[in-house]
Image (cartoon, rainbow, N blue to C red):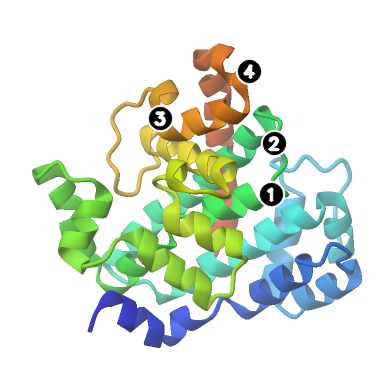
Amino acid sequence: MSLLDTIGGAQEFATLPAVASRVLALLENDNADLREITQVIETDVSLTLKILQMANSPLYAVRSSVTSLNQAVLALGLNRISNIVLSVSIFSKFMVLSHGKSTQFMDKFWHHSSSTGMVAKSLASKIKRSFRDVEFIAGLLHDIGKMAMIQFDPNRYEQSLQLITDKNLSDLEAEIEIFGVDHQTTGELIARLWKLPKEIQTIVGHHHHPEELSDLRELTSVVRIADLLCELWGAGIGEKIDEINIVELPAWQVLCESIPALKTLDIEIFTFELEEEFNRATSFLKLVTQDAN
């Protein structure tokens, strides 16, 4: 049975964690009801406690102590709350399912994913593009296909990593050789099963080559640049990037097409500031994963 067939029939991958799915569905409405969202989150006691913990952390710099979920929602805003709900729900679910070697890989996976989400969010802000925080969620989920490979067969996933070194293959090429499919196609299937928004499905399925897309080129390029920078800065999960020249990246060129002012940026200062956001992601990861097991 192929990996895609296995995923399609696996209960753990059939649906997004219930609370995360319901919150995301409510947030798709531009007139989302705060009370209804709060009531959904309150059904999960551990998630509620995690949100309160994060709301009071230095990461979000809320001015006064947050003691209730209503306060947290008001203080952080719906986008941040949805980010936390999605991050905590998915991490908690799949860390519980992990064991042995897969746990080691999952730690690296979540370091990379949370870092990519936060750097993508920072990058979008710096180029003055508003993607409604979709860049964070897309950054967080862009490699969910790798998560599936890690969960189902960590030994074969390790073999794919070895092929990247031994044969100088890309991660996509190595995955196809070992699994018969790459993480983009695998991830897009999972995104469909979870009924994630179409834009997330597209980014997950095509983030390596945003220049080939007709829609969502800017948003996907932001995620791809964040993805590569996090690989370079030590939060890698398989691409084994030693160096990059950001101005030569197809994703950066996509952004420059629509934002010509980027061509005159001081790239060294620009990437240094992004790296500071990357370092902040470590704090986010610790808060999400603390007591996850």
Q: Nearer the viewer, mark 1 or mark 3?
A: 3
**Residue 70 in sight here:** yes
At label 1, the amino acid type is Asp
Mark closest to the chain's N terminus, 1 or 3: 1
Res 5 quadrant in image? bottom left
| Marks 2,4: beta carbons within 8 A | no
Q: Nearer the viewer, mark 2 or mark 1?
A: 2
**Where is residue 208 shown, x and y percent of the image?**
39, 47
Query: Which residue is situated farthest in the left direction here?
Result: 166
Q: CA distance from mark 2 to mark 4?
A: 13 Å
Label 4 vs 3, first from the N-terminus:
3
Instruction: Write down the quadrant of residue 61 in the picture.
Output: top right
Q: Residues within 10 Å of mark 2 (few under 14, many from 20)?
A: some
Residue 222, picture quadrant: top right
User: Disc 3 marks which amino acid?
Assistant: Leu
Task: Please name the residue that numbered disc 3 is placed on.
Answer: 249
* Residue at screen point 21% across, 61% down: 176
Q: Please indicate, yes or no, whether residue 282 appears anywhere in the rendered image.
A: no
Looking at the picture, tell me which residue is in the foreground, 262 or 138.
262
Residue 133's tag is 1
